[in-house]
Image: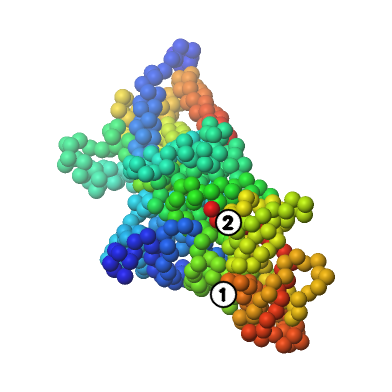
Amino acid sequence: MNEGAIVTGWPDLAPLVLSFKLAAITTLVLLVAGTPLAWWLANTRSRFKPAIQSLVALPIVLPPTVMGFYLLVLLGPYGTLGSWWVELTGSTLTFSFTGLVIASCFYSLPFAVQPLQAAFESLGQKEIEAARTLGATPLDAFFSIVVPLSAPGFLTALVLSFAHTLGEFGVVLMVGGNIPGETRLISIAIYDHVESLNYAAAHTLSLTLLGFAFLILLTMFVLNRRLARHA
Amino acid sequence: MHSGQSEERRLCVRYALERAAFTLDVDVEFAMQGITGVFGPSGAGKTTLLRCIAGLERPDSGRLVADGSVWEDTDANVGRAAHERRVGYVFQEARLFPHINVLGNLRYGQKRSTGDDSAIDLDQVVELLGLKSLLGRAPATLSGGEAQRVAIGRALLRGPELLLMDEPLAAIDETRREDVFPFIERLHADVGVPIVYVSHNIDEICRICDQLAVMDKGRISTHGRLQSVLLQTEVPFLSGREAGALINATVEAFESSDRLTRVLAGGCALWVPGEIGPAGSELRLRVRANDVSVCLERPRKTSILNVMEAVIERIQKESSGTALLHLRVGSNVILARVTQRSCTELSLSPGTNVYAQIKSIAVRNSLG
């Protein structure tokens, strides 16, 4: 029985697609929301900066289960965010795709913010000041000067948040569970396959993920080298 | 002071600003025409002053009126943002945008300046600064001097009412500065935009400025017409090794046999080495105090060509055992540095008639 499964087991690819969708949406949200946060962190002299910076970095050091646990509490039907969501939409955030997006955004936040912050800090004020004296508003200077000159930072932020979201396990298990088509992501599917000793299916999904992760990192490093040569 | 009339064609600056180790406290009026030099040691606050004028730095309190329009008034809560001030700013480093080519850099400010017909156009700037062959190049491939010329062009195409230049040659290799300076010399004559030129090089100042403000420790020590400010040797920064006078002269004739040009300065004839220009052209001559000595009798059989009758107007003793003599020569005043012992031995005092021997004269640019 099991022998047969190992030989013929071409797994269901829906979890893979779902994972990509989650990673794409999360990355988009993080680039939009993380950019102003990273800009603020790079330029502020506020005494709250260390505290905010630590909060942003927390997901790097915390076990995903701890993050997942608190997100479950926060997003659950009795949590601050969760109960408000239930009132607004009638459905719960936990064990839903939307809940996964919110959880992933918290979980992958440092991977978007830190490269952007580093890029903004290394850029400094010189070119921005030149743009300002040439008639550019702060927003204009940001889009015409800061964004193109921080392209490697944006690329790193994009790739890392995407890849990190793709690979998350603990948080999504706690918050999303394992509902096919809704919250059953690739990492959870792999775990399932291993649990049921379907190593072939686990291999196929794992190899796909591994190959993909390698490819996007390779792309990032190659592109960054090119960008660095142009700058 | 609050009527627009008195503030027309003038740049009125009053600023107070406290930083960790630095205080700026300035209250000064410049003519908003010609080239005003701002001169002083590093850390005097020259750059901070320019940054305040450009709106890149906000003063704790102050008022800035440029040609009658208020750019900043902390009492009235007026403070135009940097992009709302029509200034061109040339930084020490060119600060070109590395991701766009030279043409893109030049157009950056032009695209963002509100349509003013009087503004200089791209072709003029390219011609004036010799940028034609650089237009397609990436900023990273330019030499320091080329980059700074592009930066000047970029600032001009903003259509500024005032051009601020912060030691534009400081970051350029000393031997290459002559690649850029002639362009700056021509700038004012060709474009007519008033310029504030910060430098700690008195030679640059003597070549291009009409007015001079001297800054020290965040304050303006003195300001006024360049020629008169240079004679205010009681101002510490003007009495050093480089102390000297700047006098205007007119070319009379070139003597090709000796390769000398005869010029007339304040009613006195002087010999200047080399062929300077056609008769009638106007010059600035820089005579350093260290190159001038005095005799009580007309020196005979001397190798020095320029010996002139002079009257001592003032003697300023210096702590180094020397003294600066202010000598009236014709209608000009020049400086001479002698030892205090010579002063005593020759009984020099104000009113004494002497002969001034000028060992060397440097020709600065033509005034035209």
Q: Are there few (<14), some (14-19), or many (20+) residues within 10 Å of tag 1?
A: some
Q: Nearer the viewer, residue B20 or B26?
A: B26
Decide: is A93 above or below B19: above
* Residue B166 relative to residue B242: left or right: left
Provide residue B125's location: percent of width, then percent of height: 48, 40
Q: Residue at 61%, 67% (x, y): give it.
A: B267
Whether residue A95 can be seen here: no
Q: Residue at 53%, 59% (x, y): give it.
A: B209
Q: Residue at 63%, 56% (x, y): give it.
A: B251
Q: Secondary structure at mark 2?
A: strand
- Identify the residue position indicated by label 2 in the image: B282
Provide residue A21's location: percent of width, then percent of height: 36, 27
Q: Quadrant of residue A181?
A: top left
- Identify the residue position indicated by label 1 in the image: B232
Q: Quadrant of the C terminus of chain A?
A: top right
Q: Residue at 72%, 70% (x, y): give it.
A: B307
Q: Quadrant of residue A71?
A: top left
Amino acid found under the numbered disc labelled 2 = Glu
Decide: is B152 above or below B27: above
Number of numbered tags placed on the structure image: 2
* Residue B166 relative to residue B308: left or right: left
Q: Secondary structure at mark 1?
A: loop
Q: Nearer the viewer, residue B266 or B325?
A: B266
Residue most extreme to the right: B301
Decide: is A215 above or below B263: above
Q: CA distance from mark 2 to mark 1?
A: 24 Å
Provide residue A17's location: percent of width, then percent of height: 37, 23
